[in-house]
Image: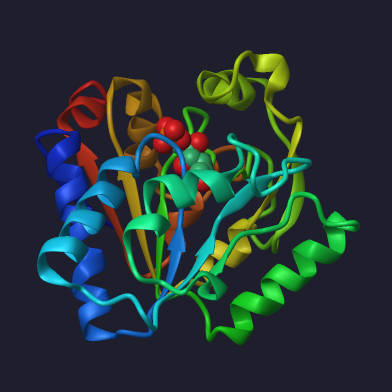
Amino acid sequence: MKILTVADQEEMSRRAAEMIIDLVRLKPSAVLGLATGGTPEGTYRLLALDHRKNGTDYREVRTVNLDEYAGLKPEDPNSYHTYMETHFFQYVNIPSEQHFLPDGTAASLNEECEDYDRLIDNLGGVDLQLLGIGRNGHIGFNEPGTAFNAGTHVVKLSESTRQANARFFGSVQEVPERAITMGIGTILKSRAILLLVSGPSKAEAMSRLLAGSEPDSNFPASALISHPNVTVIADAAAISAAK
Ligand code: F6R
């Protein structure tokens, strides 16, 4: 795991955007694995700015998102479909038929999960998977205890995750109880992984990640230790408080 420590969230976002832009320029048909949440918002903003100013071309890029809430229609203001449209897709030229997110309203969520893993394989796998980290070490919506070889699956969200995400909803009761997430096995198949960590609320998770020498299923992010190409960009608030 390569750890880059940066001053603040802005620098983290800039370094992450540079890595993604370099990849898209080198491989115009790259498959990008994308995340939602507060952490990558600045990265998406900088990618949009670069597209507008420098014309980085996303025509051939394909994207697969990590997760989606069960039961939310794509047009729901709190769905991750809406998040991606609002923060990224509307600003770059990826044809809409080349963005993929799990469908949280599929008639059979289990079939949707199997189809999603097949889709990722058919796209040729993920070139670069962007990740954030939950306070409990979750990646995607893989909560502590998830098997590290799991494919895309339906999860019951932990109380702490629902509390943390309540800020995007009116109240914690409105946060769906279940979600579809790429499994840790799916995430580990990515050719490269970029984990972004920002702010003091992530310090404990960061400290556990730095201290861990072996994967431990009670701390999902530790699965990344076994992957050969992981870059972590962490800001000073997440690192210094972690020591
Ligand atoms: C989002 C996702 C989650 C978040 C994590 C951190 O698609 O899969 O694992 O990355 O919950 O969320 P923020 O960035 O809001 O702190």
Q: Residue at x 16, y 54 (%)?
A: 15
Taking the image as drawn, is residue 151 in sight? yes
Classify residue 132 by image quadrant: top left
Image x and y of residue 180, in percent:
71, 50
Q: Is residue 220 left or right of residue 171?
A: left
Classify residue 142 by image quadrant: top right
Image x and y of residue 78, in percent:
59, 34
Question: Looking at the rendering, in which quadrant would you find the C terminus?
Answer: top left
The correct choice, above or below, for 24 with respect to 42 in the image is below
Q: How is the image coloured?
A: rainbow
Taking the image as drawn, is residue 221 in sight? no
Question: Looking at the rendering, in which quadrant would you find the N terminus?
Answer: bottom left
Image x and y of residue 59, in percent:
36, 80
Q: Residue at x 23, y 40 (%)?
A: 234
Q: Is residue 167 left or right of residue 144?
A: left
Say which of 204 and 212 sits in front: 204
The correct choice, above or below, for 194 with respect to 197 in the image is below
Say which of 4 and 88 sits in front: 88
Q: Residue at x 39, y 56 (%)?
A: 90
Say which of 122 and 87 sits in front: 87
